[in-house]
Amino acid sequence: MGLALLQHTFRHFWQAGQPNVGLHVDGLSLTGATRLYERAGMRIEKEYTRFEKELRPGEELARVALDEA
């Protein structure tokens, strides 16, 4: 199903005159998505490392909807 959706989308972009498509993905994901993208003919163009640090434990208020606050 995923491969068919990607191929349909690629065809749509091609017909619209867009010769390239790209994705930003989590390369360490355990979902197998990167294998799907490779089966669809995509290749890794760039890789990068992202650093994070938890400044304080607790709920991230920036992600809470206003009506929930």
Image (cartoon, rainbow, N blue to C red):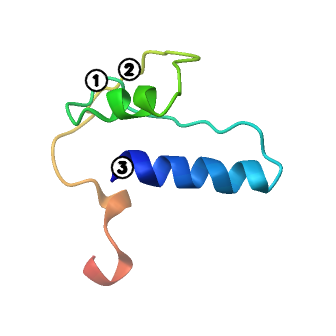
* Amino acid at pointer 3: Gly
With 28 as the anchor, is 16 left or right in this view? right
* Amino acid at pointer 1: Leu
Disc number for residue 28: 1
* Amino acid at pointer 2: Phe
N-terminal-most mark, 2 or 1: 1
Q: Within 10 angstroms of label 2, few (less than 14), some, or many (20 or more) residues?
A: few
Q: Distance between the residues labelled 2 and 1?
A: 14 Å
Label 2 sits on residue: 51
Say which quarter of the image contains residue 65.
bottom left
Say which quarter of the image contains residue 26.
top left
With 35 as the anchor, is 58 left or right in this view? left
Label 3 sits on residue: 2
Closer to us: 43 or 26? 43
* Numbered circles on residues, count: 3
Marks 2,1: beta carbons within 8 A:
no
Residue 46, given in percent of the width and then of the height, sits at: 56, 16
Q: Distance between the residues labelled 3 and 1?
A: 19 Å
Q: Distance between the residues labelled 3 and 2?
A: 30 Å
The residue under the point 36% across, 34% down is 36
